[in-house]
Structure formats: C-alpha cells, structure tokens
Image: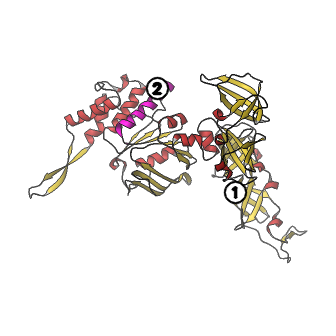
Amino acid sequence: MAKENCIISLQGVTKIFDGTSVVENFNLDITKGEFVTFLGPSGCGKTTTLRMIAGFETPTSGQILLNGKDIIDIPPYKRPINTVFQRYALFPYLNIRNNIAFGLKLAKVPYETTDKKGNKVTKYRKYTKEEIDTKVKRVLKIVDLEGFEKRYISTLSGGQQQRIAIARAIVNEPEILLLDEPLGALDLKMRKEMQLELKEMHKKLGITFIYVTHDQEEALTMSDTIVVMNDGEIQQVGKPKEIYDEPNNAFVADFIGESNIYTGTMIKNRVKFLGAYFDISDEDKEKFENNEKVDVVVRPEDFVVTKKGAGTVDGVIISKIFKGMHYEYILHVGKAEVIIQSTKEFHEEDVVGLEVEPNNIQIMKKPFTSNFYDGFLTKDYKVEFADAEFEIDVTKLYKGSKIDEDGVLLDEKGNEIYTEDVEVNVNVPFEAVTITDDLDASDINGNIISMIYIGDHYRVLVRTDNEEDFTLDTEYLWNENDRVAVIIDKKMIEVTPKGAKK
C-alpha cells in the first residue's frame, strides 16, 4: 500500500546490465516534500536507481509511478524532474544569469486563448525576458548568490558553482530534484557547510529531494528518510535515528557509524557474546529461540566503563585517542576487539570493566551461515557448481547404494545409477571456505566485494566473474576488490537431491 501523499513509487523495479542484476526488486514510496537519501557503497545501484527515476535508464522490469501514473515510457525532458550531478556541467562561456536561464529559454509555457470560432484552445509561448529575470533572481536568492548574475563560472569557488548548478535545476520548478553525489568535488569544510545549506534550501523550496551518497554523515545530517542499499537491494528504510539505533542487519550497522559487531548465542533469555552473558530487553526475549545464533551490535558510546570486576566483562585498553568531546579506546576482551567512547580518561594497559544497558544491545537474526548453490552431478560421480568440480561421497545421495570394484554406482538392487546432469542442492558452510592471493590454488577466482569486522574476525564476500557469491569468515584483513582464489574443503560440502530441504 502506497504512502499517503505519495509523489513517486518504485514497484518491483529491476535493472539488468549484460546479464548482471544491478538493481533487484526495488520497492519504495516517497512522499511529497520528503528528503530521501539513497546510501550505500560504490556500485550498490544507487545512481542507477536515480537514473531510472530521471528517465536516463529504463527498468528491465517493474513500474515507476509519478503521482500514480507510470512514467517509464515518458522521456526525461517531459518529466517534472531535474538532476544535479557531481560534475555540475555548467557552461563556462555563459555568465551566471544565462547559465541559470538556459533551460527557461528553451521552455514553452501553455496558455489558453480563443480561436476565430470562439473555442478555447491551448497554445504555447516562450518566457519573456522579464519573466526569466524574475525567476533567475528568485533562485539566486534561495542559493544566497544575489547580485552574481553577470559573473562568469570561472570566477566562482567550487561551493558557489555547486549552488549555481542547483539554481539551474530548480529554476524550472520541478516536482522532484535528484542529486547525484553533488558534494563529492568539494573539500571537507565546504562539504559540511553545503550539507546544512542544502537542508535549508529543501525547507525553502518544499519540493521532494532524492539524494545519492556513500557518505553516512551526509545522509544522517540532511535526510528525512534514509534508504540503505547494498548489492542492488534495499537493506533498510527508516529515519536517520532509527537506522542508527536499530539497524536491521550487520551490514547496516557496519555501514552507518562505528559499531561493535559480534556473533552471539541466545541462552535462556540472555545473549552470550564476548564470553559473557548479557541481559536483554523484554522485546528481544520474545524474538529469538534458545541456543539461536545471532548477530549482536553495540555502539561504542553505549558501553559503560566501570572498575575492573564491576562490569559484565573486563577488558585491557590497548589504544587511546582524544577526540575533543570524548576519548576513543580500543580494548581486548579475550581475543575480541571492542571500540568504546567515554569522557573518562584511562591509560593504555589499564584493565577496566564494561557493561551495557539491555536496550542498547541490538540483536539481529543471522541472514544465513552457509553458502547455497544449484549444482549437478557428473558421470564420474563428482558435483559441479560455481564452475568447478569436487569429489563427494555420492552414495550418501542414494539409500542403500554402493560403488562396486569396477567403480560403478549401484542401487540397493544392484542396478547401475546414472548420475550425469542430475540436479542437486549444494550447501557450503562458511567454515569450509578459505581464500588466498595465489590464484592458481583453485579453479574458483573472484573479487572481494565487501568485508565486515565481527569482533575477532572478518566476514568477507567474494564474487566470481560468473556472479557466484562465497561468504566466509577469516582472521586476516583484506581489501575490497582484491583478486583471490576460493578454496573449499570438499569434506564439508553437503549435497542433497533437488526438492529435498537444504
């Protein structure tokens, strides 16, 4: 069901380039006047989604509704939508007034008149010079550059050029303004100033802003609603505080702000992590089963530092940084690493206690703990998946079967079983997967596309050239985009017939 006062709705939108899904089953309703930010790492589909809204790309499937009407077949110039890009594309040979007025000079305004027969008809005219001047002065006032009409682009700072790009986009009074990382070319100080100015412009204009960034601070500072994306899919939609305080999963927690993320176990209405049992909220007690594995998130500011032995766990301070309003400490609790923020001053090698209020412990269901693939058997009793073959004990697939002295698979009645091209489900646990930079070590090669620190190890996602994903846990630090070979322990591969429960 669409939001009340919804201006634009994306329903089941998918975009595929060369067989690769860049945006997948994207569903989102945006309210008139809302400031919505698409937030996520590079390559997650943010800009592609924005370009589909603008009309520069056509969805492979799904609908984009503007005020309830599908606009997929409407060209960009006929949509009441304007875009501000990271590269402002201003005309250096025109002064500011003519840069802003460029679109107005091409636009045609409808007006009603009466023909010779007395019938009312709609005709189109161009804006007058006076009308253009009025509109240009209005938007220059909004972007705080009044009196700059006659200056040229080359005389402006980066921040001023960015404002002119916005002025040119809003002078036509669009219903929606799209902003594709417009602050990316600015230095840090100017970027922070422009974040506040953009938010103020949004209030003055009252139109819908859809903003794309990979900068979490920009998203938290400006947005009414944040849409966190990863790998072409929405991970979470919510208000900035909601996204920060109650992340849906470990990816969101890791991407939005600093987080301590751990693998935990639910045990009798408490959660065990960092080698200790922590009390949890009454709400969380009803969500999880006993002995269920979960992801646990605690923000650095939510750890309370106490005296040694007075908290739930003790930790050793190994690093201390003064950050103005607080100290940031890194502690070791056993083998796990903990980041905390505190106004109290301690020293390296101090042993302190840590505790957390139950409501400040965010507990999330693990999305999965194994890799699943569609595979098939070969005629020589191997399993093939992810473009590689592995030896398995094929007799486990057929009750009462055995391999005779000639190496032939027989059923319990002594009949030969033909396995070539038999489809199977393949389950590869995280712990069965390792990676190496020796690309000759395996037939499976791919690139690291994401990495999340989970307390005492990293959770790594490797994607092969044929779009097969492998998730694994490793104690070693890698870099995103590293090329690696994926090694699988064949003894841990689980194979079941198609139709059987994975």
Q: According to the image, label 1 marks what residue? A: 372
- Give the crowd class for mark 1: few <14, some 14-19, many >=20 residues within 10 Å: some
Q: Residue 136 at x, y = what percent?
A: 28, 33
| In this rendering, position of residue 99 left or right of residue 10 | left
Q: Is residue 226 magenta?
A: no
| Farthest-out residue, bottom | 413
Q: Which mark is residue 153?
A: none
Q: Identify residue type, mark 2.
A: Met
Work out whether residue 424 or residue 300 is closer to the camera in this orientation and state it: 300
Determine the residue positioned at 75% across, 23% down: 348
Decide whether the magenta segment is chiefly helix, strand or loop. helix
Cα–Cα gap, marks 2 and 1: 47 Å
Q: Is residue 439 visible?
A: no
Work out whether residue 347 or residue 123 is closer to the camera in this orientation and state it: 347
Q: Which residues are magenta?
A: 185-207
Q: Identify residue type, mark 1.
A: Phe
Q: Secondary structure at mark 2?
A: helix
Going from N to C along the chain, the mark reached first, 2 or 1, is 2
Determine the residue positioned at 79% across, 36% down: 335
Q: Secondary structure at mark 1?
A: strand
Front: mark 2 or 1: 2
Q: According to the image, label 2 marks what residue? A: 190
Q: Residue 312 at x, y = what percent?
A: 76, 37
